[in-house]
Image: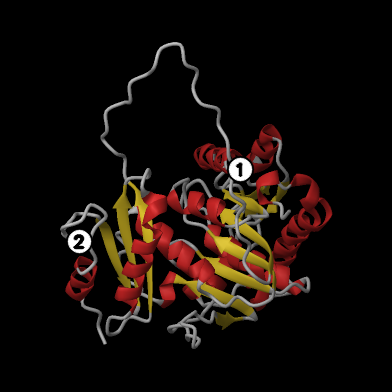
């Protein structure tokens, strides 16, 4: 059954806004409504000063939307809206009040998931999703239980790379069961919307969708959850960093200077939100001719290694630009599965070994205090 957006608006207008008189939609508090299959996300834009007092209102809105025909799951998020209030007058000769209260709020871990790793890039077109899929499969080849979250909300592609499709099943509690692909547990927005649908979402909608795919999925017991991030340094990256305790981030870049500038921005972004950078991968390092096997540095060579040294982060390894990697990804059987004993699978496993050495040997030393469990 198709979900009626007008019915969602009517349901929201049945709830009186915080200022009274008018419903939520009529009051202009609804910043956006997103419908993805049988799941609905609503963003309410409120003054941050009163946001903590509106939790009961948020829950009521979520309950009413979830009760509508065809809705399997509803998520309502509160999004901050800058208030236009005049500044309060300052008293003379009175110091500002001291700041009390706890420090940063600890992030809630995902039950059963030991490590969450973000695979990110400063720009698109560097082979990030292909790298994330093969890295996840390399972790699995090393004996780990692995899941993959395709967090690229605007352009999900993991369902194509891993060769899996169809809507995920739901549990009686209305949480989602991840799809299985090559032994990996997989969740992607690509399972919930048609492949050719343009995801034109504002920031709050991205935040709600990401939180839904993290929290409302039965991931089970995992050693590693690999998160394929959208390119850039925007809402999705900040939401993930602020929502769950990331064990670290792997930055994917190509060797040329323009890509390395964006990779550097990605490193700095994760450092600012106190997420350890596990290292940089140089993808499409050299082109290998399928006929004569001659290597040509089309995009240059060694740039990512030099940038890693300059930034003081680990250089994890090089992956060549090879038709086999492209073909196997397009066919839904990544190279680590298609040719597990080949040189490319070996390269991905070496990268995975480097990441595991950091996670298992130095994680306690490197993790920032905000994500430690007390």
Q: Look at 42% across and 64% down and name the residue there.
A: 209
Residue 211 spot, x, y in % from top left: 48, 63
Q: Is residue 125 visible?
A: no
Q: Which residue is mark 2?
A: 25
Horizontal relation, residue 234 to residue 149: left or right: left
Q: Look at 66% across and 34% down and name the residue there.
A: 311
Q: How many marks?
A: 2
Q: Which residue is mark 1?
A: 102
Residue 244 position (above or below residue 67): above
The extreme top residue here reads 93
As helix, strand or loop, the secondary structure at mark 1 comes to loop
Task: Judge depth for marks 1 and 2 and give the one in front.
Answer: 1
155 or 39, which lies in front? 39
Horizontal relation, residue 193 to residue 107: left or right: left
Residue 173 spot, x, y in % from top left: 49, 83
As helix, strand or loop, the secondary structure at mark 2 comes to loop
Residue 326 spot, x, y in % from top left: 54, 67
Residue 294 spot, x, y in % from top left: 65, 56
- Answer few, some or many: residues within 10 Å of disc 1's Cα (few below 14, many 20 plus, some between 14 and 19): few
Q: Look at 24% across and 58% down and name the residue there.
A: 17
224 or 258, which lies in front? 224
26 or 142, which lies in front? 26
Horizontal relation, residue 158 to residue 367: left or right: left
Q: Is residue 188 visible?
A: yes
Q: Look at 53% across and 62% down and name the residue there.
A: 129
């Amino acid at each position: 059954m198709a979900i009626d957006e007008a019915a969602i608006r009517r349901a929201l207008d049945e709830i009186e806004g915080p200022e009274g008189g008018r419903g939520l939609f009529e009051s202009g508090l609804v910043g956006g409504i997103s419908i993805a299959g049988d799941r609905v996300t609503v963003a309410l834009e409120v003054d941050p000063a009163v946001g903590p007092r509106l939790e009961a209102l948020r829950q009521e809105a979520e309950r009413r939307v979830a009760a509508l025909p065809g809705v399997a799951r509803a998520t309502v998020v509160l999004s901050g809206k800058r208030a236009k209030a005049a500044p309060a007058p300052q008293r003379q000769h009175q110091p500002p009040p001291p700041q009390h209260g706890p420090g940063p709020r600890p992030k809630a871990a995902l039950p059963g998931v030991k490590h969450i790793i973000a695979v990110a890039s400063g720009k698109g077109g560097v082979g990030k999703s292909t790298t994330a899929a093969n890295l996840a499969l390399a972790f699995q080849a090393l004996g780990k239980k692995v899941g993959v979250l395709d967090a690229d909300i605007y352009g999900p592609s993991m369902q194509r790379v891993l060769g899996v499709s169809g809507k995920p099943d739901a549990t009686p509690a209305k949480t989602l069961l991840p799809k299985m692909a090559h032994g990996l547990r997989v969740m992607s927005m690509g399972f919930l919307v048609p492949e050719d649908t343009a995801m034109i979402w504002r920031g709050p909608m991205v935040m709600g969708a990401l939180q839904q795919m993290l929290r409302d999925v039965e991931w089970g017991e995992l050693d590693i959850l690999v998160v394929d991030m959208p390119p850039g340094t925007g809402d999705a990256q900040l939401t993930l960093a602020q929502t769950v305790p990331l064990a670290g981030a792997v930055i994917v870049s190509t060797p040329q200077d323009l890509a390395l500038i964006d990779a550097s921005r990605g490193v700095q972004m994760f450092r600012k939100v106190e997420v350890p950078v596990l290292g940089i991968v140089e993808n499409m390092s050299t082109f290998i001719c399928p006929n004569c096997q001659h290597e040509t540095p089309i995009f240059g060579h060694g740039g990512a290694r030099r940038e890693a040294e300059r930034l003081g982060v680990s250089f994890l390894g090089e992956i060549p630009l090879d038709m086999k990697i492209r073909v196997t990804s397009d066919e839904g059987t990544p190279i680590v599965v298609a040719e597990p004993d080949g040189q490319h699978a070996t390269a991905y496993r070496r990268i995975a070994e480097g990441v595991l050495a950091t996670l298992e040997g130095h994680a306690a030393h490197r993790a920032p205090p905000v994500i430690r469990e007390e």
